[in-house]
Image: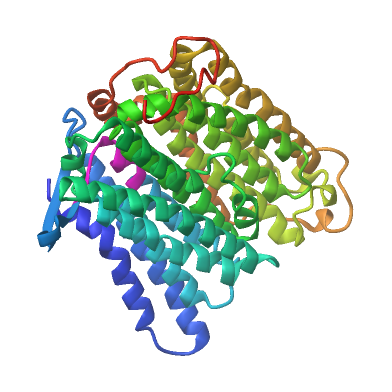
Amino acid sequence: MHPILLSLVTYLPLGGVLAIMLTRGTTEAVETSARWVALWTSAIVFVLSLVMWAQFDPTHAGVQFEQRASWASAFGVSYHAVVDGISLMFVLLSTFLTPLAIIGGWKLVNTRVRDYMVAMLLLETTLIGLFSALDLVLFYVFYEATLLPGSLMIGVWGGPKRVWASLQFFLFTFGGSLFMLVALLVMWNVAGTTDIPTLQHTTFSHSMQGWLLAGFILAFGVKLPLFPLHAWLPDAYTEAPTPASVMLSGVLSKAGAYGLLRFGVLMFPDAARVFAPYVLTLGVVAVIYAAIIALAQTDMKRVIAYSSFSHMGVIAIGLFTLTPEGIDGAIFQMLSHGIVIAALFFCVSAVSWRAETREISAFAGVAHKMPVLATLTMLFVMANIGLPGTGAFVGELLVMVGAIHVSFWLAFLGGSSMILGAVYMLVLYRRVMFGQAAGGMVALLRDLTGPELAVLVPLAVVTLWMGIHPGTFLRVFNPTVTSLVQPAPVVASDSVAPVVRTAAG
């Protein structure tokens, strides 16, 4: 087990950025080189992350591949990067989706290609750095750094409302991060360090824990997003180019859930029990509200965007059940949702790029012209609903197992995501894929190309793999979760939101 492997996985994309920036020649030659350099760099990083997975010891619940270097040691700040069973899975998710997003944008992105590939590789580095950081300042730096490539990809290569969508995304996330910065400074002032393991063993007063957790919930609730902090999401996901939508919904939103887990459930378990009824209520609201809004959409991409919001509500429920089963389910659902939502965005893109519209009313009978796409889309639609045999079923089942320890109604209302998801996803699928084949542009559609299959087939394989053999993934992070979580129920009543308690209590 080589600690330098983590540094290679984290910073090799920056080597790709440097190679792209040094490329010279005609515009066409530079764009072609940028695409290939970005693809090969991300592919090598993915292979290295698989090597990390192979060398990772799942029976050891602690951290592995640890790297520590002096940074601002006089202020208790150091460069401290590791992976454990939880963070390794999100590093793998980032490295898996990045090369697929690059292939997916091969023809979709045809302006300022070099800058776009640079942004994609920078986003990969910041995401891996974020998930492996074990110093709060280092985490904050990487967390904020994701804003730059993320907002640029929306604002430069997005749709007609891209500038507004990018501005919303930046301001919401940056505004939420200020609460994390304040919490960080308070914790540093008390402990004299920002090393996360040290902070986890530092005693904070009950009232301070409540205020600190409130700051983290506001910070990460924007990125998740948690209702009602979701206003940026529909426009950002819809206006972003498809590969950027894939990275935003597939990985970047998971940074919010990951942060809630690390700095809420695991760092302040007592305060988390106080806040749990409210977060659980907001999670249920997100599940139901987003599903209803999704059904009313006329744009295919907005349906998928609200679907993502609804499923993130399930993840919030799993995290704040504060039970090992619920948290295992939330992590599994994060991974599964990252794969499925990415696939659905690519499927929508395959049709809308050919037809030059995303309006549902413009389509009917697409399955007659694109049977391979229809077959793969059906798999991902079923996975999004939570059909047994797909990864989403395992995640949602575990979340419901955790929720039933808290309240029957919580499990019932949270589980309604499967029923509501079936309604809006099957309505969308029926209206676009079935029916009498429409004339005009639908008659001219052609089935998936080689590069499109190279993107969708791996996503399909992983979706089925997670559903048929979930133990491959659960055995990696379950020991870490069970070692860190105290399996105590949140509430004993059958209501989702019991009597209000103050954080200072």
| Screen quadrant of the N terminus | top left
In the figure, is residue 439 to the left or right of 219? Answer: right
Residue at image location 52% in from the left, 48% down from the top:
249
Query: Which residue corresponds to the image point at 26% horizontal and 56% vertical from the top-left?
Result: 138
* Left-right relation of 492 to 293: left
In the figure, is residue 1 to the left or right of 33? left
The residue drawn where x is 15% and y is 57% is 78
Answer with the quarter of the image where residue 212 lies: top left
User: Residues in magenta?
Assistant: 81-91
Q: Is residue 134 visible?
A: no
Q: Is residue 390 magenta?
A: no
Task: Locate residue 267, reporting x and y percent.
Answer: 28, 35
**In the foreground, 391 or 68:** 68
Whether residue 201 is visible, yes or no, is yes
Name above or below for residue 16 compared with residue 436.
below
The residue closer to the viewer here, 190 or 113, is 190
Q: Horizontal and vertical percent for residue 427?
A: 76, 34
Image position, residue 182 (x, y; %): 34, 52
